[in-house]
Image (spheres, rainbow, N blue to C red):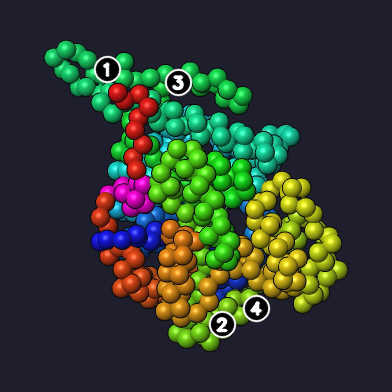
């Protein structure tokens, strides 16, 4: 297959599904969160030749949302990833784990183990997290900048640990009685602001050398972290022009860190509703919105907008923009706040419109149309370098089936998506290089 190819990942995990989806008669909500469903979903995604199965995660349930919304999966991602890896053969398996709530040694070890158990298909989505601190006894909760500072050191330590065993460190020399060449297994002796880690890791070098790091935070601090360490970036972009700007910025930051920009694949999220006709797709969109609990959805929107009060604002009224805080005052989801605040300020969106965006796609790009329209739009963004691919966030299960059965063949016919896997590892699928071990001569 020639030419630049699209990369696709399926987002499965908390969030990513329309708040009303489970109430559809055909939702099979009773099976959500069972191991059988998770495995079947991963196998279907592999049959569609996706690059990766992506497990997002939040370390605490949202009480109000739990009353009205079914999480699609509620497993700890790294544990689930092992079961998925053993039930599939080619697809990459990406697990989310927070740099704020973990320790680098344990995490490096877990992800390295996943890389071995999957034969080189492991990815780690390194997030700084915007919620969940109540479960980790950490007071005070570090601010946005503090969380990114910790993340930068965290990732540096993890990469050092993954390099700590050289490729040929294990010798199996029975005659000489030497199992491993100890000169090729290196302590890291890291003593930093947040972590003190002697190393080396107790897992040998993995099939990918270093498992794939994915980054999902879009503020300048998040972009910089991605530019230094990530091979894949998950981002929320709603307009092509903004997506192009993000794409250019991230690629140039990667070059600034001495990396070829082809080593970072940029995948905005996309939430498609695919109809038999454009009118059918619109109808599905409206019917999903009717299944949403309005007070809960409005409260969540208010939270997304920096915790402003919307209780006195009618569902069809515009957001009172004078109540919006400055982006710099947002300590949690700053880049996501910006998306919602811009629509309120510049487009004068109503509560209903913004709730529609929030419950459908959490601020990610929404596509509503026929399979042909959806395929054409994805191709447009891809060719215009707004994206190297997409993280698919199907709003309800039927959208996923339609994407696999209707949209994937159209992308293949357009020559921009693989018909068969060509490599075996996640790095192969993403077309990113294998980093050299810093110790190798
Ligand atoms: C596309 C995207 C996906 C994210 N997914 C997760 C997630 O699964 N779990 C999590 O704890 N945080 C997640 N985050 C939150 C980030 O880790 C980060 O804490 C937050 O976005 C604030 O950083 P930012 O302003 O740089 O975006 C995600 C952020 C983005 C932009």
Q: Any mark on residue 188, and which?
A: 3
| Mark sitting earlier along the chain (1/3) | 1
Counting residues from the start of the chain, the first of labels 3 and 2 encountered is 3
SS assignment at label 3: loop
Residue 37 rendering spot, x and y as whole percentages: 42, 61
In-image side of 49 versus 346 (left or right): left
Extreme-left residue of the structure: 175
Q: Where residue 260 appears, x then y in whole percent?
A: 41, 44
The reply to whether residue 314 is visible in this rendering is yes
C-alpha gap between disc 1 and disc 4: 65 Å
**Could you tell which of marks 2 and 4 lies nearer the N-terminus?**
2
Left/right placement of residue 302 relative to residue 199 reads right
Disc 2, ligand 1: is the CB inside 8 Å? no
**Which stretch appears magenta?**
424-432
Label ID, residue 181:
1
Instruction: Rate crowding at label 1 as few (under 14), some (14 to 19) or many (20 or more) other CA atoms within 10 Å.
Output: some
The mark nearer the N terminus, 1 or 4, is 1
Alpha-carbon distance for marks 1 and 3? 17 Å
Question: x, y percentage for residue 411?
Answer: 36, 70
Quarter of the picture holding the N terminus: bottom left
Q: Residue at x 39, y 40 (%)?
A: 211
State whether residue 439 is above or below residue 330. Answer: above
Eye-nearest disc, 3 or 4? 3
Residue 387 lies in the magenta stretch: no
Q: Which residue is mark 4?
A: 290
Q: Quadrant of residue 116?
A: top left
Residue 315's x, y, as percent?
77, 74
Residue 54 figure quarter: bottom left
- Left or right of residue 371: residue 61: right
Image depth: mark 1 or mark 4 in front? 1
85 horizontally vs 330: left or right: left
């Amino acid at each position: 297959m020639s030419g630049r190819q699209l990369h696709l990942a399926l987002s499965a995990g908390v969030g990513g599904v329309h708040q009303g989806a489970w109430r559809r008669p055909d939702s099979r909500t009773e099976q959500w969160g069972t191991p059988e469903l998770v495995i079947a979903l991963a196998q279907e995604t592999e049959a569609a030749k996706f690059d990766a199965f992506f497990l997002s995660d939040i370390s605490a349930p949202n009480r109000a949302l739990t009353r009205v919304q079914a999480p699609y999966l509620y497993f700890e991602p790294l544990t689930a990833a092992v079961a998925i890896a053993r039930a599939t053969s080619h697809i990459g398996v990406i697990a989310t784990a927070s740099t704020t709530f973990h320790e680098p040694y344990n995490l490096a070890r877990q992800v390295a183990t996943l890389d071995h158990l999957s034969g080189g298909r492991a990815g780690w989505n390194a997030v700084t997290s915007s919620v969940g601190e109540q479960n980790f006894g950490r007071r005070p909760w570090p601010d946005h900048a503090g969380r990114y500072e910790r993340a930068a050191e965290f990732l540096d330590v993890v990469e050092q640990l993954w390099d700590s065993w050289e490729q040929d460190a294990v010798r199996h020399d029975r005659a000489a009685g030497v199992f491993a060449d100890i000169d090729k297994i290196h302590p890291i002796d890291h003593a930093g602001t947040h972590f003190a880690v002697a190393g080396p890791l107790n897992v040998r070098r993995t099939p990918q050398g270093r498992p794939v790091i994915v980054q999902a935070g879009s503020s300048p601090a998040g972009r910089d972290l991605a530019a230094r360490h990530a091979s894949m970036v998950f981002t929320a972009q709603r307009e092509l022009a903004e997506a192009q700007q993000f794409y250019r910025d991230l690629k140039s930051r990667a070059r600034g860190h001495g990396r070829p920009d082809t080593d970072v694949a940029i995948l905005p999220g996309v939430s498609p509703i695919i109809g038999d006709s454009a009118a059918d797709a619109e109808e599905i969109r409206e019917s999903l919105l009717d299944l949403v609990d309005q007070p809960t959805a409005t409260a969540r929107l208010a939270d997304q907008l920096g915790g402003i009060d919307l209780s006195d604002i009618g569902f069809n009224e515009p957001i009172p923009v004078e109540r919006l805080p400055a982006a710099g005052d947002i300590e949690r989801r700053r880049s996501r706040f910006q998306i919602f605040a811009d629509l309120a300020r510049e487009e004068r969106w109503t509560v209903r419109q913004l709730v529609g965006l929030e419950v459908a796609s959490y601020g990610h790009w929404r596509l509503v149309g026929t399979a042909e329209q959806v395929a054409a739009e994805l191709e447009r963004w891809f060719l215009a370098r707004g994206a190297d691919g997409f993280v698919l966030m199907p709003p309800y299960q039927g959208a996923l089936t339609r994407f696999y059965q209707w949209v994937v063949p159209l992308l293949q016919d357009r020559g921009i998506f693989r018909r068969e896997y060509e490599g075996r590892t996640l790095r192969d699928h993403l077309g990113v290089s294998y980093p050299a071990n810093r110790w190798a001569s």
